[in-house]
Image (cartoon, rainbow, N blue to C red):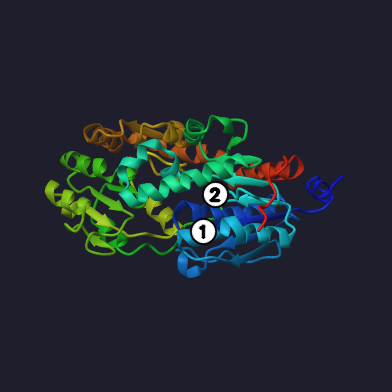
Amino acid sequence: MSERAVRSQGAEPLLVCVDGVGIRSGGGAVLLRQLLRWLPIVRPGWRFHVFLLPRQAREFEDPAATDAVSVEFVGSDSTASRLGWLTAGLPRKLSSLRADVLFSFANVGVAFCPIPKVVYCQQSLAIYSGTQQYLGKWMRLKMALLRRLILRGCNSSQAVIVQTESMRQELLRLDSGLADRIRVIPAGWSEAEGVSPIAPDGWETAAAGCAPRLVFVSQHFGYKNHETLLRALPKIAEAFPCVRLFLTIDSPQGRNGRAGSGDILGRLIVQLGIEQRVTFLGTIPHEQVQLVLSQADVQVFPSFAESFGLPLLEAMVVGCPLVAADLPYAREVAGESAVYFPVSDPELLADAVIRVLEDEGLRAELARQGPLRAGRFHYRYVCESIAGLLQEAAVKASPVPALPSR
């Protein structure tokens, strides 16, 4: 029996290398932080060596180093550096560390990998066909390159993790040969995450003078569908004159504040006459997201595509009622904990929000269902599933290509 097989069967702990180079912010950063907390809990004795971009190249803090988790900073924020890391730097590191398995967390798996690997695919922009129309020319080219790298890495892996069945179907649309490798493991939450005692700038002042409070937690990309939400706001305001919408993106006039006319959304806001009804909170930390959602009346989530839709789960955890796009990813996450609307219809979006706000019983039921459903997404269960795949890959690794000779 090989040394790797002995370790993977539990006689000795595994050394898992986690490639997080390429993770800069957003849901990926939140997920990585929680995996590094929970994987050592569900697999005590295992060691995790994490590769990340230097601090100045990302928007999240360094993970805490522990006896189980060590962190190494490599590369720079450029496509050329990323390619060099994947083709040469990472394979050499894996060999020198004598790691048992690679967890390719940042979408792309090494094509010529000296050890077994599991690829975590979470980049919806590169996978979903419907997102391309919302990207500029250079971003489309970048996503096309990333898509090729993702598929190449997936085909040389022992397993591929996606977060929803809809994401699995999109990946199979690109390569049906991956059917036996793809596993659906959702993102998660932890009761230890807590709610920040400090509100984000602009929340307390704006929220104190308005009701109801609508929130959309997202970054600013075209496929997030802010436009449909903004177009629904005037009709909502007819029923609720003091309504205010809070967006976790920067104002067209700079971080925080009221809407201006500095970009497409800003011009739309001015055109619709809703400048006084929209507040931009800017990008806020995960803990503050929980606080905002716990004090909001409804989170509206109109996104056209998501690898998971973490803000849906974040709202469910704190019992914030949800109104979401009627798409497979949202129904997979929220189930009966949301009211749904046709994704491109602002009139029906407004009707759904008004229905929830006017029906106290429905609102209470959504607030009750959310935390109950969220229980199935706890990080302990998520990490048990991931650890099982890592262990299986270390045991049943198929032959991998040798490194190309120099």
In this view of the protein, can residue 365 be seen by the observer?
Answer: no
- Residue 88 % position (x, y): 61, 59
Residues packed near mark 1 inside 10 Å, few (<14), some (14 to 19) or many (20 plus): some
- Residue 211 % position (x, y): 25, 49
- Residue 307 % position (x, y): 46, 42
Which residue does the numbered mark 1 point to in the structure image?
82
Taking the view exactly as shown, the residue that stands out farthest to the right is 1
Which residue does the numbered mark 2 point to in the structure image?
108
In this view of the protein, can residue 242 be seen by the observer?
Answer: yes
Q: Are marks 2 and 1 in contact (CB under 8 Å)?
A: yes
The residue that appears at 22% across and 63% down in the rendered structure is 253
The residue that appears at 15% across and 40% down in the rendered structure is 238
Nearer the observer, 277 or 295: 277
Q: Amino acid at mark 1?
A: Arg
Tell me if 399 is positioned left or right of 310 in this view: right
- Viewport quadrant of the N terminus: top right
User: Which badge, 2 or 1, comes first in the chain's sequence?
Assistant: 1
User: What is the distance, in whole Å, between disc 2 and disc 1 at their CAs?
Assistant: 10 Å
- Residue 322 % position (x, y): 37, 39
- Viewport quadrant of the C terminus: bottom right
Q: Amino acid at mark 2?
A: Val
Secondary-structure class at tag 2: loop
